[in-house]
Each structure stands twice: as structure tokens, then as C-alpha cells.
DNA sequence: ATAAAATGTTTGGAAGGACTAACTTTTCCA
DNA sequence: TGGAAAAGTTAGTCCTTCCAAACATTTTAT
């Protein structure tokens, strides 16, 4: 039966459904079109394909829903997306818009290994409350002034 | 005159020329084909396009060279590639093959801002000889055993 | 020197993704 | 309740990237 994996672009369409669903029950073609920056015919076309592959349910002029299979794929993409976004935003201090944008493009191309490592890295860095504020502050300073401290001062244990 | 920016794929073709050129002077279509995992006709086609855009020089059955403009683009792509590869390999400890692979796909999609921040981050982390070995060792441990130290021990200043 | 092997090119076609223009449903409100 | 506006779809086209098959050139080895 050779379940062919959705393309990167198709993953985007699936992910957008999860992201737009927040709260309300229905997702509209126009919303997806807006969110993905494509025109509505592109969405209709994508939904047809995804529907054929059993990943979404969609009837003409009707609502869009994920099937259980589609839900799985979408969640997975979303998870990758979040890991990248957090890294960019919380560690590299990239602004929210750029972070979301870059994450959206990177999420499709990272290997499972890199994905796992990155998630661990984020946990590692952000889970050390005694260290990371200092750490990130130093990085911030470095970004702005090019100043690299060579030692680990006492501050390390404070705040 | 609207210099249209090369597509991600075209950037790959350009970058492969720099990477294959190492040492020898000539780059062959067959090498590019091999390196990029595409058949030769694809390379010929790409070279025609790049040639039209003034980024490479290439005559039938002859050698492939970058023009000054092509050189600039290729170097830029390569720089992005290296930043990502180093991050994956030297900080996240992803194996070399996976790192090269992922970097190759990510290099096209990161924004200039993220690129700059990432480069700074790598410098920052790797330029602190008194701290980063401890740091990376702790991360290594976390990857393997899930152990997150909560404080910054004296070791921080050693080795 | 010459034929086989290796290299490279051309042609034609497929698949994915996106768009415009024109058409159809649905929604909404006067 | 009967259109107009909004939402959605269809049809037709374009562009990028790739490939296989057939053809052309260069290299190499005898």
C-alpha cells in the first residue's frame, strides 16, 4: 500500500489546519489561503490531493477537517516547528515573526536526529534556571557589543 | 535589470562547484551530478540556466567555472552551510553525515538575521575555552542520561 | 589509430505547485 | 425574500525540477 509521505508543501497545508483550528471548530479555505500566503485555488487543489490520500476530509463548499492520519502528521510537523521556533526565539533572540517564518521553512528539512537533539538542547539550556539567565544575558551582550567573557564569574550562581 | 535571485536549487548547483573545486581546477558535470544526486541532464539544464544568468561559464563538453558574480553567491551559500554544519556537529553532536545533509537543506531557508545570530551563537559558545567544554560535556550527559545539573559547579572554571 | 567506454547534450515528457479568469454556492442583509 | 458580496471551485497555463532515451563528443586502452 506504500503510503507515500506528503511533500513539504502538503505538510504546510496540514499544519495550518491545526494552527487555525485553535478554539473554533471549523477551518475555512480562505483562512488557509491567508495563513499560507497562497490564493484560494491553490488551497482547493491541495485539499483535493490530501483528501485523496486520506489525510483531510473536505466536501465542496464545506468545512475542512483532519482525519486521524492527517492529525498525526500535522501534530508531528507542528512539534518540529515549535522546537525550532523556541530555539530561534528564546535562545537566539530572533524576533517572533522571523522565528515563525524560518521555523516554518526549516521544519520540513531537519532529520529526526537533529530534531531530537535540538529539542534536548532547548530543554537543557532552558531548564537550568540558575545558569541560563546569565548565559543568555552574556550572549545578548555579545550580540550587541561583541564582548565575550572568558571566565565563569560568580554571577553564574546568582539571580 | 532586476537581477532575479537564484532559486534554492540553483544555489545548490553553484555551491557544489565550490565544494568540488577543492584542489583541482576543473569541475565536471559528472561530479556535480554525483554530488547532488541528480542525473547529468539535470546538471546540463541547470548550467544552461545559470549561464544565461551570468553566474557560471560553461561551454559544450567543456569545463565549468564560476563567474565573479557566481562566486559571490556560491560563497555566501557555503558560508551559511558551514555555520549550520558547525552548530549541528560541534554543538548538537549530530554525526557528520547527517549534519552535512541537514545543513544543505537548511542553508536555503534561513533568514539573514537568523544566519547572523546563529554564527554569533557558535562563536560565543565555542570561544569560551574555560566554559564550553564543561558545558558541552553536561549537554552530552543530558543527551545520554537525561541528567540536568541545576547549578554551576567549580568545574566550570577548570579544564 | 581506432573502437569501446566514459562523458555530455538534446529532446520530450512527467509531477508538483502556483496563478488568473470565469463560474458556482453560500451567506448575509436591506 | 431576493439579490449582492463573500467564499469556493474549475479550467487552463506557467514555471521549476527532474528523468529516460537517443544522440554527440571526448577519452582511453589496445
Image: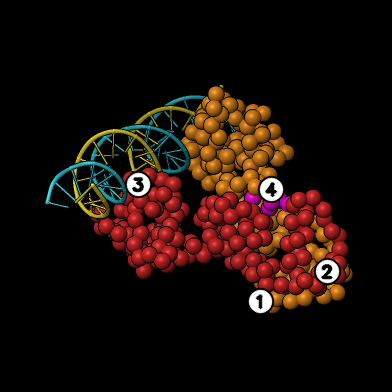
Chain colours: A red, B orange, C yellow, D cyan
Depicted A59 relative to depicted D16: above or below? below
**Residue at the disc numbered 2:** A155
* Mark 4 vs mark 3: in front: 3
Res. A70 image quadrant: bottom left
* Residue B152 pos. (x, y %): 80, 73
Label placed on residue A40: 3
Magenta segment boundaries in residue numbering: B114-120
Name the residue at 79% across, 64% down.
B132
Quarter residue B144 falls in: bottom right
Verify CB contact (< 8 Å) between mark 3 and mark 2. no
Q: Closer to the observer: label 4 or label 2?
A: 2
| Residue identified by numbered label 4 | B116
Q: Residue at x 49, y 62 (%)?
A: A78
In the image, A75: left or right of B14?
A: left
Which residue was labeled with disc 1? B146
Residues tagged by mark 3 and mark 1 found on one chain of the structure: no
C-alpha gap between disc 3 and disc 1? 46 Å
Labels 1 and 4 positioned on one and the same chain = yes
Amino acid at each position: 500500500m506504500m503510503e507515500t509521505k506528503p511533500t513539504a508543501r502538503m505538510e504546510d497545508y496540514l499544519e495550518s489546519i491545526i494552527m487555525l483550528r485553535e478554539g473554533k471548530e471549523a477551518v475555512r479555505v480562505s483562512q488557509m489561503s491567508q495563513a499560507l500566503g497562497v490564493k484560494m485555488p491553490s488551497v482547493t487543489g491541495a485539499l483535493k490531493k490530501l483528501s485523496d490520500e486520506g489525510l483531510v476530509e473536505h466536501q465542496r463548499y464545506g468545512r475542512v477537517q483532519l482525519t486521524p492520519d492527517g492529525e498525526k502528521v500535522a501534530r508531528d510537523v507542528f512539534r518540529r516547528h515549535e522546537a525550532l521556533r523556541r530555539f530561534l526565539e528564546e535562545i537566539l533572540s530572533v524576533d517572533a515573526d522571523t522565528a515563525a517564518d524560518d521555523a516554518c521553512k526549516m521544519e520540513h528539512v531537519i532529520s529526526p536526529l537533529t530534531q531530537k537533539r535540538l529539542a534536548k538542547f532547548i530543554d537543557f539550556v532552558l531548564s537550568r534556571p540558575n545558569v541560563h539567565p546569565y548565559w543568555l544575558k552574556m550572549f545578548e551582550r555579545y550580540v550587541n557589543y561583541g564582548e565575550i567573557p572568558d571566565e565563569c564569574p560568580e554571577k553564574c550562581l546568582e539571580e
